[in-house]
Image: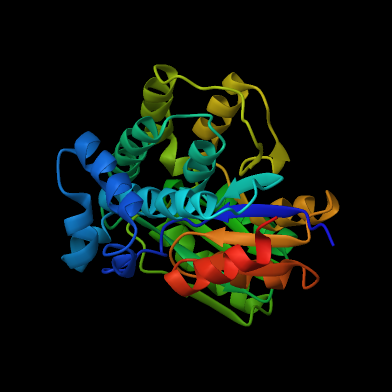
Amino acid sequence: MDHKVAFVFPGQGSQVVGMLSEFAATRASVLDTFAEASAVLGYDLWQLVQNGPEAQLNQTEFTQPALLAASIALWRLAREDGIAEPAMLAGHSLGEYSALVAAGVIDFADGIKLVQLRGQFMQTAVPLGEGSMAAVLGLDDAQVSAICSEITLNGGPDDVVQAANYNAPGQVVIAGKNAGLARAIEACKAAGAKRAMALSVSAPFHSVLMQPAAEKMAIELAVVDFRAPAIQIIQNVDADFCQHPDKIRENLVQQMTSAVRWTETIQLMAGAGVTRVVECGPGKVLAGLNKRIDKSLVSLSINSLASLAEGVEELSQ
């Protein structure tokens, strides 16, 4: 049977010291991909990824290039080993840049430079310790959104909070100033959330508080060459397909201050006839979310030699 396949790429949180280490001895293209990235960054990215320190790898300006390089290295291996071109692509937050590289919209070197800057801009948009994120489990999207809106509208400047990631049914991440976040956590618990807890994140990503970062990012994106995607791509801000290079660029700016609409992204794929969704990158975060969004989808992960071989067997034509 002919299966329609989509590839998806993970965002921050999937990184781990030592990721992709088993590929070093046998797959030269992995080291080549990291060498390309290192040449852009001005430091040895492979060395950092393999040996840490973990605290440095987890700083967003280092995390973002590391995950982009890891995801594209795995994407290149999958294609080298004969996995057919997928019907569509998407990425979660940072992962959208991996999808754009895979779709041929931007060059890998440009992608690496952009996500390094993106990490720097995101970290400095809000002073350290003033804002963060929290996960809310067991409420629907509209409930969480309404709670955040009410707190923001009726509170002061320190009460800004909004939905940042619609990750799966009953799983929403919110972002904001610490006071607003604390109020939202309590309000979500009062509304019947199974859990509402602060995350160990250094800034309120995907919220209006990222506006300074979005403005800086717009300047950087404007000077990078964008092309029409060779593979259909779904973007985070509107969970819809986008073909026009200028619109893709505009959506990346908006992505900084807008929610990641992951649930709708996977629903769109399923509605378009996709039967297999492959997470291409470290970890299995998206595979877990995708199963919660639509149990009929077959979820695969490509993140190791064994899973690459399984993917090739499952997906090669």
Is 260 placed left or right of 223 in the picture?
right
Tell me which corner region of the image, top left, top right, bottom left or bottom right, holds residue 115.
Answer: top left
Q: Residue drawn at (84%, 53%), measured in percent from left and top?
A: 273
Q: Residue drawn at (36%, 62%), measured in percent from left and top?
A: 201
Is 212 placed left or right of 267 in the picture?
left
Residue 100: x %, y % from top left: 53, 37
Closest to the observer: 185 or 117? 117
- Taking the view exactly as shown, the residue that stands out farthest to the bottom is 194
Residue 32: x %, y % from top left: 29, 46
Residue 187 visible somewhere in the drawing: no
Q: From this view, report whether residue 144 is shown above or below residue 209.
A: below
Residue 221: x %, y % from top left: 42, 24
The quarter of the rendered structure image containing the N terminus is: bottom right
Colour scheme in the image? rainbow
Q: Residue drawn at (61%, 47%), measured in percent from left and top?
A: 90
Closest to the observer: 165 or 182? 165
The quarter of the rendered structure image containing the C terminus is: bottom right
Q: From this view, report whether residue 112 is shown above or below residue 170.
A: above
Closest to the observer: 125 or 251? 251
Residue 98 visible somewhere in the drawing: yes
Residue 302: x %, y % from top left: 51, 64
